[in-house]
Amino acid sequence: MRLDEYASHDMIGLAGLVRSGDVTSAELVSCCLQAIEAVNPRINAVIGLVPEDLRAEMGAEGPFAGVPFLIKDIVLHMAGMPNEAGSALCAGLVAPEDSELMARFRRAGLVVVGRTATPEFGYCSTTESRLSGPTRNPWNTDLMAGGSSGGSSAAVAAGVVPAAHANDGGGSIRIPAAYNGLVGMKPTRGRTPAGPDYGEPLSGLGIEHAVTRTVRDSAALLDATQGADAGARNIIMPPARPYLEETTADPGRLRIRWTDEPWSGIAVDADVKAALAEVVSLLEGLGHAVEPGRPEIDYPAFFKATKIFWTAGVAGWIEGAAAATGRKISLDTLETSTLACWEYGRTLSALDLLWAEDYMNRVSRSVAPFFASDDILMTPTVGRIAQPIGFLDANRPSGWTADEWTDAVFGHAPFTALFNMTGQPALSLPLGSDSRGYPVGIQFVAAWGREDVLYRLAGQLEQASPWAGRRPAVHVAN
């Protein structure tokens, strides 16, 4: 199979070719390895390959039998593979067993070929760790790919694989999906498992799924992986029917509110506002009821709670990693921003964490009524167009405080993190372009547990404003 043919198919398409006997899994894996060799030197998305003996028994059966896949190098564990979380502190750590989600990827028939870059401990909205170096945007390699799932997103956008594992604790699926022109679904809290090593990453802010090129792949993969694992704290009702079926179902006339004004009050780029306005017109033309509006929150309290959850969570990860490796926590093993957040996280008390958990409860209950009267909230996914590599320097000479770093990380993507706090499903679609011709993502948020509503609308929008034919400058078929 030629690389251009390989890259023209999504996961469902490739799986169909394997089932029909038109291509073998070995041929697809060979294509994937060729693709990595062709584009990875320019984008630095894939940071390690799975040895042949570890992938030998993968891909035998399942809905995606034989399809190559990549996993992000944080939270998810694959037995026998490094799990370094983008940090020198964790360098060389090897997972002794699979995470439950990894086991579900295996049962789905996916063949994991490699692991992808992440910023240190995922605490950044661009992927430029000191351990692995910067991941570059395939649309323009001078620009950032976003984060923290920047490696996965750049690889998918460049045609290395049709989909890749990702996770999201503040926008880390949706932000890089927006910058790379992909579909990025953050499921409802508890929809996918993080165990057994993690219960609820970042006190419930974090959730696992993937970035994909097509809506149907996102839905079908969630069908294959959704559901709580044994011992999970959050167990939610399964979908009434497969999400894949929702992608071709009529969404009906939805009540959609939109805003381009972030709760932080930060300025939004004109190109981003223009892209959102075009989607407002598109939705009106499709017959939906579209009006401006948004739920209101106490942003200073929200920022404080976010900082507590992130710094406490990262401090815990760091302490565990230091104990596992025997390495000293210092600027030799951590980046400047991460060290500052670890230092702050260690000062927090149980009462601080209880306050943040109480705020999570209060803000979730204050936002929920908005979705009783409206089906969807639409916002830009990010507030700024993709910035140059180095725009957010974790190791700047002047240093960082935890306040400064958290504000900087979420500053140019101010629309995503609220829905990690409330736990609602949120989806970024590549519906816009900036004045340079690079992707602008639009975020759609639904009520708790209503991924079905999002997938129905996404399927309609993919038909009305298709993005499949758009290809970045760095791509395996170029």
Image: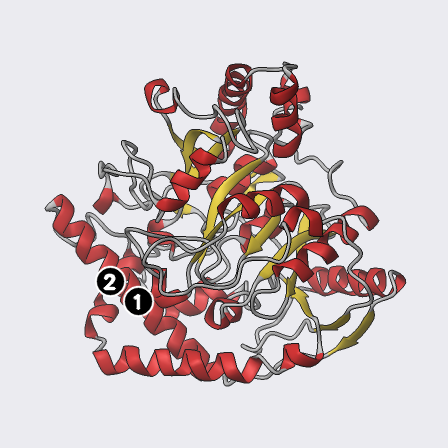
> Is residue 147 shown left or right of residue 295?
left
Q: Which mark is residue 293?
A: none
State the residue position of label 1.
311
**Residue 271 in picture, x, y percent from top left:** 72, 60
* Residue 434, above or below 137: below
**Residue 438 in picture, x, y percent from top left:** 68, 46
* Mark-to-mark CA distance, 1 and 2: 6 Å
**Residue 231 in picture, x, y percent from top left:** 32, 58
> Is residue 63 shown left or right of residue 93?
right
Q: Secondary structure at mark 2?
A: helix
Report which quarter residue 21 is drawn in: top right
Q: Residue at x 50, y 20 (%)?
A: 29
* Residue 300, above or below 194: below
Q: Residue at x 32, y 62 (%)?
A: 398
Asked whether the residues under the numbered discs 1 and 2 touch, taking CB atoms below 8 Å apart as contact, a structural biologist would say: yes
State the residue position of label 2.
315
Would you say residue 210 is visible in this rendering?
yes
